[in-house]
Image (spheres, rainbow, N blue to C red):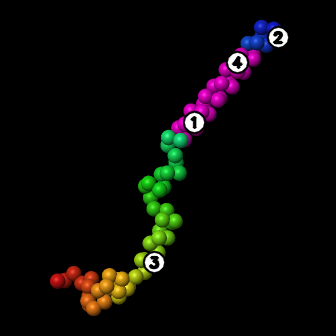
Amino acid sequence: MNEQDRELLQKMCDVRMASVNLIEDLNQTIKEFDPLDIPAKFSVEPRDLRRYEPYVNLTESDMRRILGNEDEENMWDESG
């Protein structure tokens, strides 16, 4: 192997090591800032709404029954 081949091989190794380091840095950044966590922290996903579905279409009488206030009329009347 002549000097020119060694220099070329060394440059190839340097580029390879730089690539490996870049990939490791990117992987570490992704681990620290996981984009998949953002929706769960900052917004409500449709899958989160499923647990509230039974309560979405409740009527006033349904609410009274659930709360045990079936005898009270106009329990949501805020006039007094």
For residue 11, above or below residue 37: above
Residue at image coords 29%, 86%: 69
- Which mark, by number, is residue 26? 1
N-terminal of the two: label 3 or label 2?
Answer: 2
Instruction: For the residues labelled 2 and 1, say whether their Cβ atoms are less than 8 Å apart.
Output: no
Spatial CA distance of label 4 from label 3 is 65 Å
- The residue tagged 2 is 1
Q: Main secondary structure of the magenta part?
A: helix
N-terminal of the two: label 2 or label 1?
Answer: 2
N-terminal of the two: label 1 or label 4?
Answer: 4
In the figure, is residue 53 to the left or right of 72? right
Residue at image coords 27%, 82%: 76
* Secondary-structure class at tag 4: helix
Q: Position of residue 23 (x, y in %)?
A: 62, 33
Q: Amino acid at mark 4?
A: Lys
- The residue tagged 4 is 11
Question: On the image, which quarter does residue 18 sit in?
Answer: top right
For residue 24, above or below residue 4: below
Residue at image coords 48%, 51%: 38
User: Which numbered disc, 4 or 3, marks the residue closer to the eye?
Assistant: 3
Spatial CA distance of label 3 from label 2 is 76 Å
Query: In the rendered structure, which segment of residues is drawn in magenta?
Result: 8-30
The C terminus is located in which quarter?
bottom left
- The residue tagged 3 is 54
* Secondary-structure class at tag 1: helix
Residue at image coords 67%, 20%: 14
Between residue 12 and residue 40, name the one nearer to us: 40
Q: Amino acid at mark 3?
A: Pro
